[in-house]
Amino acid sequence: MPYATNADLPPPVRRSLPKHAQDIYREAFNHAFVAHADDPRQEEAAHRIAWGAVKRSYLRVGGNWTARPC
């Protein structure tokens, strides 16, 4: 189930990630969801890939996600 907007993301994602990180998550999830269409664990794989994409650009410090330094 691809996400059309950030408002469609799961509540924990919306609560914990800044807007730009939500954009990254949504785009990575949607791409991975389509790419893994034949995988029986399609949605699980897409969520893992989306979190991986967020972690390349953001770092969790305490309970907050902050952009990684360039």
Image (spheres, rainbow, N blue to C red):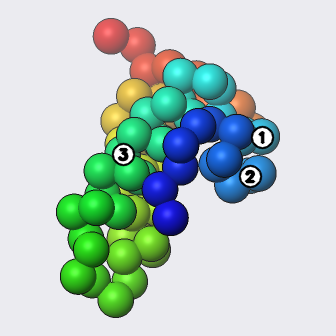
Q: Nearer the viewer, residue 52 or 4?
A: 4
In the displayed structure image, the side of residue 14 where residue 69 appears, left or right: left
Mark 3 neighbour density, 10 Å: few (under 14) some (14–19) many (20 or more): many
Q: Which residue is mark 2?
A: 12
Q: Are marks 3 and 2 in contact (CB under 8 Å)?
A: no
Where does residue 19 sit, x and y in percent of width and height? Answer: 62, 24
Q: What number is the disc on residue 28? A: 3
Mark 1 or 3 closer to N-term? 1
Where does residue 34 sit, x and y in percent of width and height? Answer: 28, 61
Where does residue 5 sit, x and y in percent of width and height? Answer: 58, 37
Q: Are marks 2 and 1 in contact (CB under 8 Å)?
A: yes
Where does residue 17 sit, x and y in percent of width and height? Answer: 65, 35
In the displayed structure image, the side of residue 19 where residue 63 appears, left or right: right
Instruction: Answer yes or no: is residue 20 visible.
Output: yes
Residue at image coords 62%, 36%: 6
Mark 3 or 2 closer to N-term? 2
| Quadrant of residue 62 within the rendered picture | top right
**Secondary structure under the numbered disc 2 in the rendered image:** helix
Camera-nearest label, 3 or 2 = 3
Residue at image coords 47%, 56%: 2
Q: Which residue is mark 1?
A: 15
In this rendering, the answer to whether 70 lies above or below 31 is above
Q: Nearer the viewer, residue 64 or 49?
A: 49
In this rendering, the answer to whether 69 lies above or below 34 is above
